[in-house]
Image (cartoon, rainbow, N blue to C red):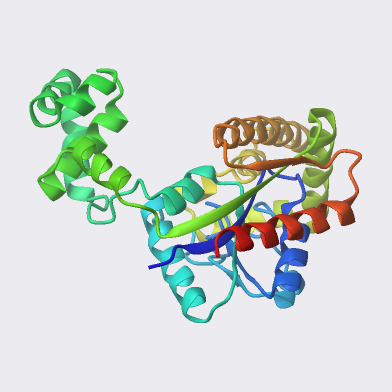
Amino acid sequence: MERQKTLVLVGPTAVGKTELSIRLAEELQAEIISADSMQVYRGMDIGTAKPTLAERQRVPHHLLDVVDPDESFNVADYVALAAEVLARLRADRTTPLLTGGTGLYIDALLDGFLFPDAPADPSIRQELEEQGAKDPASLYAQLQEVDPVSAARLHPHDLRRIIRALEVYRRTGEAISALQQKREQQQSPYDPLYIGLTRDRQELYARINLRVDLMLEQGLVEEVADLLAQYPQQPTALQALGYKEIASYLRGELSLEEAVELLKRDTRRYAKRQLSWFTRNKRIHWFNRTNGDDQELFQTILELWESFLLERQ
């Protein structure tokens, strides 16, 4: 079967992906698939810079507001849901536009390194974690027995990955390294054109600071307070960037000024990590938007997409 051509728009937070993605989707009659690990949560709108209702009315958006903050959601869940959306768009002959800043989700979906037949198993995970707390060396020894290839790759103290490898083995009866090799031999069903957006560091950091200020004006403190009241157990989702800092303020651990400065700093660091992740992907066509012409960039991306489609005919 012909691989599904997919336009992919990536970049760090606050670089300007949302408006450009909507303009491109309008022009191409495409539908947007979000690749953001926090925008899947309902009620977490301001702190995740989720597209507004007005923006969503301009073009169809997928994988926003998928689960409640106290529900578990991981990269395997994302890949399964995104694959369903892509299959529907393929059947409708509609162009998919995948956009977001969660590189892990994008890579997992498009390069297929996940193991959907081996979802996380809480009981196995708990058993392994308890064993790891008592005797971490025994877990590494187990991995050396059942999957020496993975054991050779991992540091004996990398408990998280050791546990995941053992969990996959118990669920499937196969070593995670063998499953990885199978995946690498399978061709991805998707044929992506990657567009990356960046800005000069000082401009990007200034935009991040302004965005945080805007979030506060839009009611971020009230949003976090409502979520804490609704979910007093404070699920993992509320440890996300933008929420944990404001929650610390609401608990009296920080002043509002301290929480805001911490949020700005943490967001700048997050943007740096995003760029580090994306720059490893040599297929991305990068565009620096500092001092750039937005209309010229828009036209250039459209031309790249047209050329991409012609090359694949």
Q: Is residue 23 left or right of residue 77?
A: right
- Residue appearing at x 52%, y 51% in the figure: 37
Query: Could you say where residue 214 lies in the image, as x and y percent from the top left?
Result: 82, 50
- Residue appearing at x 81%, y 31% in the figure: 200
Label total for image: 0
The quarter holding residue 52 reads: bottom right
**Residue 124 shows up from this direction:** yes
The quarter holding residue 225 reads: bottom right
Query: Could you say where residue 24 lies in the image, as x and y percent from the top left?
Result: 74, 64
For the C terminus, the quadrant is bottom right
The quarter holding residue 30 reads: bottom right
Q: Is residue 233 left or right of residue 167?
A: right
Query: Could you say where residue 117 lies in the image, as x and y percent from the top left?
Result: 23, 56
Q: Nearer the viewer, residue 73 or 295?
A: 295
- Residue appearing at x 70%, y 56% in the figure: 222
Q: Nearer the viewer, residue 152 or 286?
A: 286
